[in-house]
Amino acid sequence: MSDLDHMIAYSVAALASGDENRIQSLVRDLAEDWPAQSALSVSFALTSAATELEGVSIKNADAANTGYRLASLVAADVMAIEVMGRSNAKTLHLLHFWRRVDLYFLQAAGPQFITSV
């Protein structure tokens, strides 16, 4: 199983758990646990997980929507990193970006606002 497969499985489990703390730390955990992966792999893993959950049952619609929202926010951060001159950003670069520019995914309260939108 590849790192990306592990990231997707981790994302599915976190999103499907309904555990707010686990969901809140999901994006940060992906970046910390796979620092050498492409930064876009986080967005891809979240999108893949959301798609998988969406196909399972209607009760997973909220979890899937949360996954899609998180994926889009990560993709926006990757774009910002690339606009600032870093091509082929890695998840480690996301962590640096979040520490310096946008603390959203590093703060415990971050993604909880996403699930209530």
Image: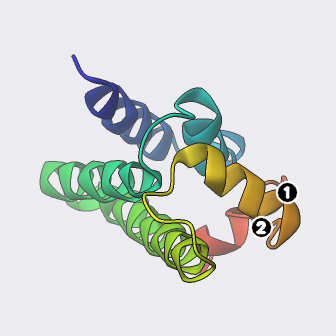
Provide the secondary structure element on which disc 1 rests: loop
Q: In which image quadrant can residue 46 be found?
A: bottom left
Q: Nearer the viewer, residue 25 or 1?
A: 1
Name the kind of residue labelled 2 in the image. Answer: Tyr
Quickly name the residue at label 2. Answer: 104
| Percent position of residue 59, x then y | 31, 57
Q: Are marks 2 and 1 in contact (CB under 8 Å)?
A: yes
Horizontal arrangement in the rendering, residue 67 relative to residue 89 (left or right): left
Question: Mark 1 Cα within 10 Å, few/some/many (few <14, many 20+)?
Answer: some
Residue 5 lies, with reference to residue 96, above or below; the image says above
Residue pictured at 42% horizontal, 41% vertical: 11
Instruction: Determine whether the residue tagged by mark 2 lies in a helix, strand or loop.
Output: loop
| Res. 105 in view | no
**Residue 64, horizontal then vertical, whole percent:** 34, 61
Q: Which residue is disc 1 drawn over? A: 107
Binning the other alpha carbons within 10 Å of mark 2 as few (below 14), some (14 to 19) or many (20 upward) gives: some
Q: Is residue 117 above or below residue 87?
A: below
Q: Position of residue 84 (x, y in %)?
A: 63, 79
From this viewpoint, is residue 75 visible?
Answer: yes
Answer with the quarter of the image where residue 72 lies: bottom left
Residue 21 is left or right of residue 47, and the answer is right
